[in-house]
Amino acid sequence: MSENFAELFEESIKSAELNPGTLITGQVVDITNDSVIVNAGLKSEGNIPRWQFVSATGELEVAIGDDVEVVLDMVEDGLGATLLSRDKAKKAAAWRFLEKAAEEKETVIGVITGKVRGGFTVEVGGLSGFLPGSLVDVRPLRDTSFLEGKDLEFKVIKLDEKRNNVVVSRRAVLETEYSAEREALLDNLKEGAVLKGMVKNLTDYGAFIDLGGVDGLLHITDMAWKRVKHPSEVIEIGQDIEVVVLRYDEEKKRVSLGMKQLGEDPWVNILDRYPVHSKLSGKVTNLTDYGCFIEIEDGIEGLVHVSEMDWTNKNVNPAKVVSLGDEVEVMVLEIDDTRRRISLGMKQCKGNPWQDFSAIHKKGDKIKGLIKSITDFGIFIGLDGDIDGLVHLSDISWDEKGEEELQSYKKGMELETVILAIDSDRERISLGIKQIEQDPFQEFLASNDKNSLVKGVVKEVDAKGAVIQLNDNIEGYLRASELSRDRVDDARNILNEGDEIEAKFIGIDRKNKTINLSIKAKDDDEEKAVLSDYSQQNASTPTLGDIFKNSMEDK
């Protein structure tokens, strides 16, 4: 035993009664895998569990020959051994340390180790303490993860060794530090000043920045020139950043900060850099139901509206065309530098299929395609370039009504059509099926002049008149009033279905494509012809008076 230890031991014996709980000094005389052997000058050496001498990092804190403080648990147990505790000695020392810090209002170093109801657990001076949530900072923090696991300064505000209760405050430390810093900062705070600060808290609308005694608000719109959906995209809690003072309300002590203002505004001279109709590449940064946003340079985004993504699919799902992070080629369609909006187009970087079609085909050309869809107003035909042409109901058949004719067409059928019109600007192509053949109505008019006689068969008859089938495709109508010069109250009294008739072609109903007929007019014409012939015959035969007159003149 060294003289120093002997002296220390003798001193400890004199100054303390050797009762359980007494704090004494001993010397490490041996270390095993499980225990540390300490000689405290008692009847026997004490075996203390090795773990009581291991630090938080797992290292052994003592070596043979070191003097250590221990607590006497039992002078002698039933087996004649002395029980000592290094752990209790540490706690006793920690309590003395915290009592002194509380009395002298000094700060202590601690580490936030976890969350509990109402606050946090803090390891301070080897003891576990409680940090109320309201005392973490000078203002409420939504996220405290940046404080956890770090050495922080606290003030002890409550101690109760009997209840093993330790309460600390970080807010008290900050208020003390901030009071002097705050006054100095406020005295020199002015708009345009560039300051350094730490991100304390994030919200949906921005971030609170600790400037050193004063908090400032960095609004989300002042974080970057580009669109920011959430502050966490740009900064994180605990990060040190540089900001500029945008506004300072001295009366309310409110400070508005900016980050993007530290760099040059990318919208300056943007019209010179990106002329309308120029093509460029950009990255997809956001997808919406109405389009996608493209970043063409840092801080500058443009919108490709869904209608500008594809020439043919107007209701395209943007997510099926592009993905976040994709590099795409776009064309500048419009720039509103006042409202800071750019309209971009993707389809304009590809060939316009409507113009391509117009360059190859012309009105009157015949073209084939498959039926893509059938609607109430017509048939859509798929054409080259993944575009559609429309056959309107009125252009399906010369004979039948379009609604009835639709019944004979099915999706996927191949049809031959005639191009009726091409409007590449409005992206419309009009097609016709019936125009493949000559209009039978026009053929009839070309073969039969108005006022000529035509023949037909009674197809239908009612009181008002009769429908006359003139040929396979053309019908005429014979009103009851045109049946005879005599009054006819009911056409059925004169005509029957299947009767063959001859009538005069007296008019055209172009809307309904029917020929107006008249038997009465035919009869009138025939009577006039008979009278005319009779008059001519009478004019060439001499009367008895003419003969007598001529004979008298000869004499």
Image (cartoon, rainbow, N blue to C red):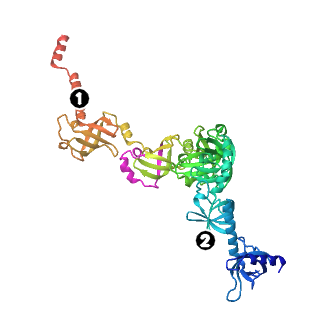
**Any magenta on residue 220?**
no
Range of magenta residues:
392-419
Q: Between residues 186 and 103, which one lies in front from this camera angle? A: 103
Q: How many residues crowd mark 2 within 10 Å: few (<14), some (14–19), many (20+)?
A: few
Single out the residue that lies furthest toward the right.
Answer: 3
Task: State the SS at label 2.
Answer: loop
Q: Is residue 539 left or right of residue 50?
A: left
Question: Is residue 263 something that shows in the picture?
Answer: no
- The residue positioned 39% from the left and 53% from the top of the image is 408
Q: Amino acid at mark 1?
A: Lys
Q: Amino acid at mark 2?
A: Lys
Q: Is residue 360 above or below residue 126?
A: above
Label 2 sits on residue: 162
Give percent across and percent down for residue 339.
Answer: 57, 39
Query: Which one is in front in this view, the residue at disc 2 or the one at disc 1?
Result: 2
Q: Is residue 78 left or right of residue 386?
A: right
Residue 528 is labelled as 1
On the rendered image, what quadrant is the C terminus found in?
top left
Q: Between residues 269 and 526, which one lies in front from this camera angle? A: 269
Task: State the SS at label 1.
Answer: helix
Q: Between residues 384 and 85, which one lies in front from this camera angle? A: 85
Mark 2–mark 1 distance (CA, rounded to whole Å): 140 Å
Give percent across and percent down for residue 137.
Answer: 62, 56
Question: Is residue 401 something that shows in the picture?
Answer: yes
Cβ atoms at labels 2 and 1 below 8 Å apart:
no
